Each structure stands twice: as C-alpha cells, then as structure tokens.
Image: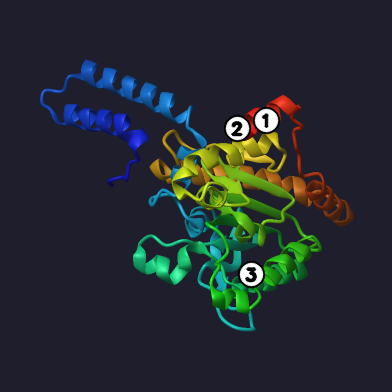
C-alpha cells in the first residue's frame, strides 16, 4: 500500500525505494540488501527520534493513521452502536456504543474522522455538534448504570464552530459533559490517538487516566488557530506548535497526561497492528488498576487529578523583556 509522505520523510522513502529495487534484482545481492536495511533503520531512528512538535502534529493528521473505529475493530469484539441524543439528531462525528475487551463489557466513545472527502463530510472531520456531546453523555450514563468502564478515543480538530451548533448550545453541552463526567462512578480511560484540540476534546476527555499515542497532540487550540490569534498569520503554525507544549512528552512533564503509548518506528500508520497491540496492553493495565479502587477513592482521585493541573514558570524581568522582544 502506498503511504503518503511528508517532506521530512523523503530520505526514508528514497531508501525504501532503493531497497525494493535491490530486492527485485536477480541474482539478489544479499550483502547490499542487508546494508540498505541497516541504513534505512538508522535513518528512520535519526528522523523519528528527533521530530519537532510541528512534525508530530503532521503525523497526527496523517491520512493513513488509524482512526477510532479502527482501534475498536482491532481490539474489541461484539460492538453494538448506540445512536442519537434523544433530543435532536445522531451526530456522525462521534460513534458510541458497547463492546467487549478481553472478555469484559465496556462502553466506547469514539471521535471519528473519515478516510476520504465523502466520509469526512458525513463525519464532519471529527468535529462534534452539541447533540454529539449529549449522545456521548447519554451512553456514558448507561455505562454508569450498568457498572461498565468507559473508554474514550479522542481524535478531533475541535468542536464544530458553526452557527447552528452555537444556537443549539455548543458551549453548554461541552461544559455539562465536563461537569457530569466527574460524577460517573465507573473507571474512565481517555486515549488521544491523533488530534486532541480544545474543548472539542475535553468535552469527552475527563478521565481517571489520560493516555496519548507517541505522535498525537493535545492542546487548548490548534497551532494554526494560535498563530492566527497571536501573529495574524496561520503560516506561523510551526512556531506556535513549539510554544504550545502540545506533544506527549511535554504533557507528561506537565502532568496533564499519565502515559505515552509507543508507536512503531515511522508512526502508527506504518504498522497499525503493532499500534493496536500497544494500546491494548496500556488499556488493560490501566483498567485493571482503576477497577481495583473503591468508588469513593476513584472519584476523589479523578477530582484531585484535574485540580492539580496547571503549572507556570516565573521569569525575571530581563528574561521577560527578552522573550517579548523575540
């Protein structure tokens, strides 16, 4: 399968093409093939172990990257979808329902993007409307009623900002979800698998454990949105990405997320099965830990986790002046 490549991946693609040509040649030069494979692995490690924040943002948006329902199909069985918010409509940007994970029943909330233009139009590029957040909460309350853990796959460029969404109470729906998720008496594991932008992500993102794939990002705003506000130029998105501290490593250091799930060398899209395996291991481990906690302790830890978020660094006057001039 042909894989779309970014500019920083071009040296890898060239080596891969050389390797394919060598492997087709007869007679095979095994020594040359081995040397090319070693060089390819060395170049992959050199590039992917030193990615910039903006390059990770690009990988999180890769068109071949596994989407939420790919993880459900790769990890779970007996999925039954639940539709609609029982108030307005069925938001296709979020898929909700129940499934079995390693024999255990659980609730899944999936922010879902499309693979092509037609599907993206149906899924609204993963941008939920108010009825999507209300649908998610309706299904989470069912899980709470029947004592099922909740797993949320986060992958959205943000909540939908259209006039209709605002008229139907977008901000209220997100705020209500944030409030009500703190009251659910079952374990909640949130996994950022691609983009986790703004209140669009946080509206289903209150969890006892927040996990992130290695090349995902999670932030109050997209780099382009930040650049447009600060510098009136979306072309400054790369600089904004560096300042926003949106990568998994940044957020572990800031204690916003709890665990980084490793991706195969080159990104999740190059080896989805290994990615599913890594997510499954992390999910099973965290569910086991959370299910061992009494309900009152679970709720208390969830509350304290989010109350503890928020760190800042004080600069001396000369440092602040230098930073402003830059």
At horizontal 35% and vertical 65% (from top left) the residue drawn is 117
Disc ID at residue 6: none
Q: Which residue is mark 3?
A: 133
Which sits in the foreground, 160 or 305?
Answer: 160
Residue 10 in percent (x, y) is at 30, 33
Residue positioned most to the right = 296
- Residue 301 in the figure: left or right of residue 141: right
- Residue 27 in the figure: left or right of residue 4: left
Count all numbered tags in the image, as a single digit.
3
From the image, state whether disc 1 or disc 3 is nearer to you: 1
> Is residue 103 something that shows in the picture?
no
Q: Which residue is mark 1?
A: 321
At horizontal 54% and vertical 49% (from top left) the residue drawn is 193
Q: Earlier in the sequence, mark 1 or mark 3?
A: 3
Disc ID at residue 325: 2
- Residue 283 in the figure: left or right of residue 21: right
At horizontal 67% and vertical 69% (from top left) the residue drawn is 171
Distance from label 1 to label 3 (Cα)? Answer: 43 Å
At horizontal 31% and vertical 23% (from top left) the residue drawn is 37
Q: Are marks 2 and 1 in contact (CB under 8 Å)?
A: yes
From the image, state whether disc 3 or disc 2 is nearer to you: 2
- Residue 61, relative to residue 40: is it above or below? below
Residue 321 in percent (x, y) is at 67, 30
Q: Secondary structure at mark 3?
A: helix
Which sits in the foreground, 295 or 138?
Answer: 138
Q: Secondary structure at mark 1?
A: helix
Q: Are marks 1 and 3 in contact (CB under 8 Å)?
A: no
- Residue 167, relative to residue 75: is it above or below? below
Which sits in the foreground, 238 or 69?
Answer: 238
Distance from label 3 to label 2 (Cα)? Answer: 42 Å
């Amino acid at each position: 399968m042909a894989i779309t490549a970014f500019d920083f991946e071009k040296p890898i693609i060239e080596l891969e093409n050389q390797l394919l040509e060598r492997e087709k040649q007869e007679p095979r030069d095994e020594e040359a093939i081995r040397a090319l494979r070693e060089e390819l692995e060395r170049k992959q490690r050199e590039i992917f172990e030193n990615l910039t924040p903006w390059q990770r943002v690009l990988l999180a948006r890769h068109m071949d990257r596994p989407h939420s329902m790919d993880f459900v199909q790769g990890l779970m069985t007996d999925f039954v979808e639940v539709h609609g918010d029982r108030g307005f409509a069925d938001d296709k940007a979020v898929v909700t329902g129940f499934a079995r994970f390693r024999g255990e029943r659980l609730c899944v909330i999936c922010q879902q993007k499309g693979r092509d233009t037609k599907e993206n139009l149906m899924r609204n590029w993963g941008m939920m409307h108010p009825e999507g957040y209300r649908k998610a909460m309706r299904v989470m309350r069912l899980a709470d009623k029947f004592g099922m853990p909740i797993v949320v796959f986060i992958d959205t460029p943000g909540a939908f900002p259209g006039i209709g969404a605002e008229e139907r109470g977008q901000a209220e729906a997100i705020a209500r979800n944030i409030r009500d998720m703190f009251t659910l008496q079952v374990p909640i594991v949130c996994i950022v698998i691609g983009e986790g932008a703004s209140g669009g992500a946080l509206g289903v993102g209150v969890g006892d454990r927040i996990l992130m794939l290695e090349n995902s990002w999670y932030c109050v705003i997209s780099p382009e949105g930040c650049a447009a506000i600060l510098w009136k130029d979306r072309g400054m998105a790369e600089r904004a990405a560096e300042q926003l501290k949106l990568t998994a490593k940044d957020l572990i250091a800031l204690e916003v997320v709890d665990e980084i799930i490793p991706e195969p060398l080159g990104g999740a899209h190059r080896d989805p099965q290994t990615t599913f395996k890594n997510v499954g291991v992390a999910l099973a481990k965290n569910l086991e830990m959370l299910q061992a906690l009494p309900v009152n302790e679970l709720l208390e830890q969830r509350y304290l986790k989010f109350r503890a978020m928020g760190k800042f660094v004080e600069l001396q006057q000369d440092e602040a002046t230098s930073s402003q001039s830059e």
